[in-house]
Image (cartoon, grey):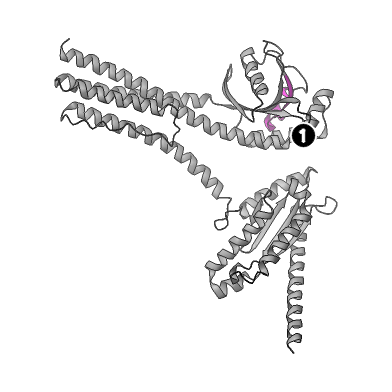
């Protein structure tokens, strides 16, 4: 076969290979990266909603067909999640079989405020069957997820309305019986289109570059072209193979084949390497941009010095508590801790030592209240919100944190700025006496200042006794 024809055929084959290999590799890498983010998002949502569910109570509701108070509260919380998060559906179902009809049993499903207002009839019936809403193929995925008993399972489900990415987690009662699946659906139709468009752009870029260099190859054909092209093709194949399962941050460009033919083959080699670098950089920018956005959102609610939650986060949590108080579901306590002698440390040893004092004191509080959010609401003031297990053990934990500060304060071997001391006060929400969260905070703050005053009085009395002994 003539060399020009051989090069033409070879270049055409290479262009097709580049389009397919790089296009498919980029498609799968980018799609995997996006789905991984969706998976992390759905995992967080499922974990949050699962914490609201009393599975035993839900099982009784399903068995009796009667909705309990906890069921209505769960409905409200799930509705709030759906209104505040970018999801399509949030629901609990019980897989029954893999037939084409009545293969699932409804338990509960979140509804947005708009649906409650305009489409109240779409509310699911507790214990109702789903008819032909789920195909046998879809039902099989839910049944498999139930049978696998994994913490979380994810799958893509194409429906007549679009493509959903579904995350599920099994619900098991205290006796170990499967009650159903907590599920969340996110519409990924637009994501699929975006990924497809990205792949098309990459393919078109490869086609344009390949066609341009093919014309040059045809004009300057010689016997030194075949081997360099083969080497380049091998590197492209290695790139495609290495990137199939890589995420956006671990993508790496084609390894430079180091072709130095001083002709168009060398130019093609460099162009392909640059193109792979641009492709990798493009994907990395997308991933980095989303990561930065996530970190910025998190940092906005974190104290720069101690890394615990800041005043902004405290205000947001207090708004949630106000809503719970309004609905009669609030059960919490607030612990207020005010660091002692911070000004003295700053004046005598400088603000750097004062910062060390704040950080170490914060660690004491966080170690004791390891299951509760800690907020730094002022320079030397911290608040702990107690709910759940820490709320039940609030008195024990209060003794622990008080004792921890006392031991540190009395440790003569420690440096002066590491003899930690804090006055602590706690108040429990009383629905009969408190109308707002601020009422609880004021009581806790008052108790804290009373304890601070007692501590100062005790310290002065001890000093007076010491002087009397000296006499």
Magenta-tinted stretch: 105-124
The residue lying furthest to the bottom in this view is: 471
In the image shown, does 179 or 208 lie closer to the viewer? 179
**Closer to the camera in the image, 356 or 342:** 356
In the image, farthest residue toward the front: 413
Q: Horizontal and vertical percent for residue 428?
A: 79, 54
| Element type where label 1 sits in the image | loop
Does residue 77 show up magenta in the picture? no
Left or right: residue 25 compared with residue 79: left
Image height of 1 relative to 77, above or below:
above
In the rendered image, residue 305, in percent from the top left (x then y), is placed at 55, 58
In the displayed structure, would residue 206 be above or below residue 468?
Answer: above
The reply to whether residue 387 is in sight is no
Q: Is residue 97 visible?
A: yes
x and y percent of residue 12 in the render?
Answer: 26, 16
Report the side of 285 relative to 355 (left or right).
left
Compared to residue 155, the image places residue 391 above or below, namely below
Looking at the picture, tell me which residue is in the foreground, 313 or 308.
Answer: 308
Q: Quadrant of the C terminus?
A: bottom right
Q: Which residue, given by chain and number where applicable, does mark 1 sit on?
A: 54
Which residue: 21% across, 30% down?
259
Q: Residue at x 59, y 69 (%)?
A: 417
Dividing the picture into quadrants, the one containing residue 26 is top left
Question: Which residue is at the front of the view, 165 or 147?
Answer: 147
Q: Quadrant of the N terminus?
A: top left
Tell me residue 448's x, y (percent). 74, 64
Residue 426 in which image quadrant: bottom right
Whether residue 70 sits left or right of residue 422 in the image: it is right
Neighbour class for label 1 at 10 Å: few (<14), some, many (≥20)?
some
């Amino acid at each position: 076969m003539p060399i020009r024809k051989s090069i033409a055929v070879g270049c055409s084959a290479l262009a097709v290979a580049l389009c397919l290999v790089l296009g498919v590799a980029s498609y799968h890498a980018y799609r995997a990266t996006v789905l991984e983010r969706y998976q992390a998002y759905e995992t967080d949502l499922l974990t949050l909603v699962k914490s609201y569910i009393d599975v035993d109570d839900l099982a009784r509701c399903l068995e009796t067909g009667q909705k309990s108070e906890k069921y209505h509260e769960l409905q409200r919380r799930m509705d709030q999640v759906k209104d505040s998060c970018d999801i399509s559906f949030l629901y609990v179902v019980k897989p029954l079989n893999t037939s084409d009809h009545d293969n699932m049993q409804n338990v509960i499903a979140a509804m947005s405020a708009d649906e409650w207002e305009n489409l109240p009839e779409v509310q699911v019936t507790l214990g109702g069957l789903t008819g032909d809403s789920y195909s046998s193929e879809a039902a099989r995925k839910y049944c498999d997820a139930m049978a696998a008993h994994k913490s979380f399972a994810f799958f893509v489900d194409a429906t007549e309305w679009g493509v959903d990415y579904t995350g599920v987690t099994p619900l098991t009662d205290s006796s170990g019986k499967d009650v159903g699946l907590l599920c969340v659906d996110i519409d990924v139709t637009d994501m699929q289109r975006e990924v497809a468009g990205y792949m098309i752009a990459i393919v078109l870029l490869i086609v344009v570059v390949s066609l341009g260099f093919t014309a040059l190859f045809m004009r300057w054909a010689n016997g030194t072209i075949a081997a360099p092209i083969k080497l380049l093709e091998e590197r492209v194949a290695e790139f495609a193979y290495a990137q199939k399962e890589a995420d956006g941050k671990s993508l790496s460009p084609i390894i430079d084949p180091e072709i130095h033919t001083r002709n168009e083959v060398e130019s093609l080699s460099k162009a392909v390497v640059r193109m792979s670098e641009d492709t990798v950089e493009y994907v990395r920018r997308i991933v980095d941009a989303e990561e930065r956005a996530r970190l910025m959102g998190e940092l906005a609610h974190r104290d720069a010095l101690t890394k615990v939650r800041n005043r902004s986060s405290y205000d947001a949590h207090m708004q949630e508590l106000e809503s719970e108080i309004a609905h009669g579901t609030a059960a919490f306590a607030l612990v207020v801790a005010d660091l002692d002698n911070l000004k003295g440390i700053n004046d005598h040893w400088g603000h750097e030592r004062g910062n060390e004092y704040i950080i170490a004191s914060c660690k004491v509080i966080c170690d004791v209240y390891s299951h509760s959010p800690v907020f730094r609401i002022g320079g030397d003031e911290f608040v702990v919100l107690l709910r759940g297990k820490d709320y039940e053990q609030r008195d024990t934990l209060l003794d622990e944190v008080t004792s921890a500060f006392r031991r540190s304060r009395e440790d003569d071997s420690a440096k002066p700025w590491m003899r930690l001391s804090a006055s602590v006060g706690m108040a429990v929400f009383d629905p009969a006496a408190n109308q707002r969260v601020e009422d609880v905070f004021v009581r806790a703050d008052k108790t804290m200042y009373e304890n601070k005053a007692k501590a100062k009085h005790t310290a002065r009395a001890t000093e007076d006794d010491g002087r009397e002994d000296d006499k």
